[in-house]
């Protein structure tokens, strides 16, 4: 049974985060029913319908799922229709993984063929491995072969997602060279026609990498040539980021059993704080210390969720500015102990000139920072 089948058949309340094709099954069904445009070979939807799945279509009651430049979605989808892989790069927390999941769900109807890159990732976890009991008993055969995401994606004509590819050793990354260039995966342990897996129509790879990881295990030039690179930028507009944080926090809080809606004035303070600590500039143009920690929109959503949980489960309310301070420390002090001192200076020096009860409460709560 596949992961998708498990998550779809289990009670919805027991699954913390179903894949995109399960969460938005109704939208995908409506898009397929209305899709009359030409489709690339092996695709579940046309390029136009896949685009609408990501950016939204009010007429079909399809929600907008990615806040960013729509032309990025166009370029990404066209890349996947070619023989080149798609590489999404950007700062941590810019929704690269979400975008790769949404695109895979639209193109293949399955976003679960995923490789999670890391220092311990091996070629077996990418290509295939063996059932060693059967291998010893019968020798190499298709029965003893255990397909990994790459082999399955090629054999089934589906999109394979490779998260954090630059976290993998260089020699492990390069096992993608032949599948991306020749569209073939060799299995030398087998013989005859079974020793080669040829990619079916619809197969391609979406990889993601954080710009902060450059230099960890940078990709070889040969592998880079087989990808088209697209940069996913942070959200530039304050109102757009605030709306996204509010919507995502409300969804997460409802999922966590919190019935109180997050307060807009509290979220305005939270999002402003994150943007200023991320850019090193206040709303009125003053320069300030920029944190080395990732102060992304995704982190802001996480803190907004924690603020709501803290307010609801400790006091039976929606959460306030004091909860922001209490929840910020775990975000600010991840990478560098000096970040906590920078955050303390920000709360002491950059808050006093602002109007509003929540800003005053944020300033007064600065003593809640540890240390």
Image (cartoon, rainbow, N blue to C red):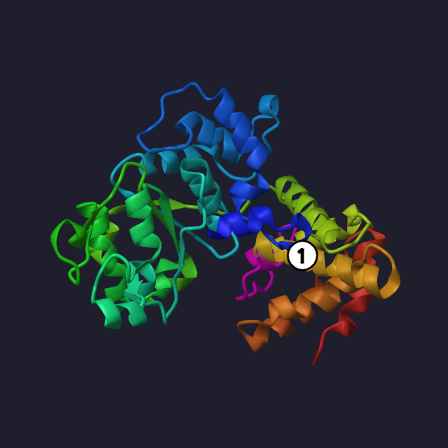
Against 274, residue 110 (above or below) is above
Q: Secondary structure at mark 1?
A: helix
Residue 353 seen in render = yes
**Residue 119: percent from left, percent from top:** 36, 70
Prevailing secondary structure class for the magenta stretch in the rendered image: loop
Instruction: Tell me the residue at 79%/56% (across/down).
Output: 359
Drawn side of residue 202 relative to residue 90, left or right = left
Residue 225 seen in render = no
Q: Residues within 10 Å of mark 1 (few under 14, many from 20)?
A: many
Which quadrant of the figure has residue 163?
A: bottom left
Q: Nearer the viewer, residue 137 or 356?
A: 137
Instruction: Tell me the residue at 68%/51% (across/down).
Output: 13
Residue most extreme to the front = 137
**Residue 49: percent from left, percent from top:** 46, 27
How many numbered tags mark residues here?
Answer: 1
Instruction: Tell me the residue at 58%/75% (across/down).
Output: 338
The answer to if 284 sits in the magenta stretch is yes
Q: Quadrant of the C terminus?
A: bottom right
Q: Nearer the viewer, residue 294 or 32?
A: 32
Q: Nearer the viewer, residue 311 or 150?
A: 150
Drawn side of residue 81 relative to residue 370, left or right = left
Q: Which residues are magenta?
A: 276-295
The answer to if 61 sits in the magenta stretch is no
Residue beneath label 1, please?
A: 273
Against 3, residue 83 (above or below) is above
Instruction: Tell me the residue at 19%/46% (across/down).
Output: 181
């Amino acid at each position: 049974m596949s992961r998708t089948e498990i998550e779809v058949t289990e009670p919805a309340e027991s699954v913390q985060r179903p894949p995109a094709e399960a969460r938005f099954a109704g939208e995908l069904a409506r898009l397929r029913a209305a899709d009359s445009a030409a489709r690339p070979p092996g695709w579940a939807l046309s390029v136009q319908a896949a685009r609408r799945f990501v950016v939204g279509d009010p007429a079909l009651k399809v929600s907008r799922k990615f806040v960013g430049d729509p032309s990025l979605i166009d370029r990404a989808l066209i890349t996947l229709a070619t023989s080149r892989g798609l590489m999404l790069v950007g700062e941590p927390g810019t929704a690269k993984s979400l975008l790769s999941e949404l695109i895979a769900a639209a193109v293949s109807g399955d976003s679960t063929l995923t490789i999670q890159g890391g220092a311990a990732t091996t070629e077996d976890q990418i290509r295939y491995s063996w059932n060693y009991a059967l291998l010893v008993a019968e020798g190499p055969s298709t029965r003893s072969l255990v397909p990994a995401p790459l082999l399955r994606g090629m054999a089934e004509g589906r999109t394979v997602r490779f998260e954090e590819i630059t976290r993998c050793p260089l020699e492990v990354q390069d096992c993608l060279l032949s599948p991306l260039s020749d569209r073939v995966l060799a299995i030398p342990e087998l013989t005859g026609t079974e020793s080669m897996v040829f990619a079916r129509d619809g197969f391609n790879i979406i990889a993601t990498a954080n710009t902060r990881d450059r230099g960890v295990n940078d990709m070889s030039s040969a592998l880079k040539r087989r990808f088209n690179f697209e940069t996913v930028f942070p959200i530039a507009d304050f109102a757009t980021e605030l709306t996204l944080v509010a919507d995502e926090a409300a969804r997460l809080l409802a999922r966590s059993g919190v019935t109180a809606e997050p307060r807009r004035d509290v979220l305005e303070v939270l999002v402003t704080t994150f943007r200023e600590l991320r850019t090193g500039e206040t709303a009125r143009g003053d320069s300030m210390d920029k944190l080395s920690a990732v102060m992304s929109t995704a982190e802001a959503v996480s803190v907004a969720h924690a603020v709501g949980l803290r307010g609801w489960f400790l006091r039976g309310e929606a959460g306030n500015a004091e909860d922001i301070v209490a929840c910020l420390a775990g975000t600010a002090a991840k990478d560098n102990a000096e970040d906590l001192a920078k955050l303390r200076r920000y709360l002491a020096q950059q808050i006093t000139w602002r109007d509003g009860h929540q800003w005053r409460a944020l300033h007064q709560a600065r003593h809640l920072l540890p240390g």
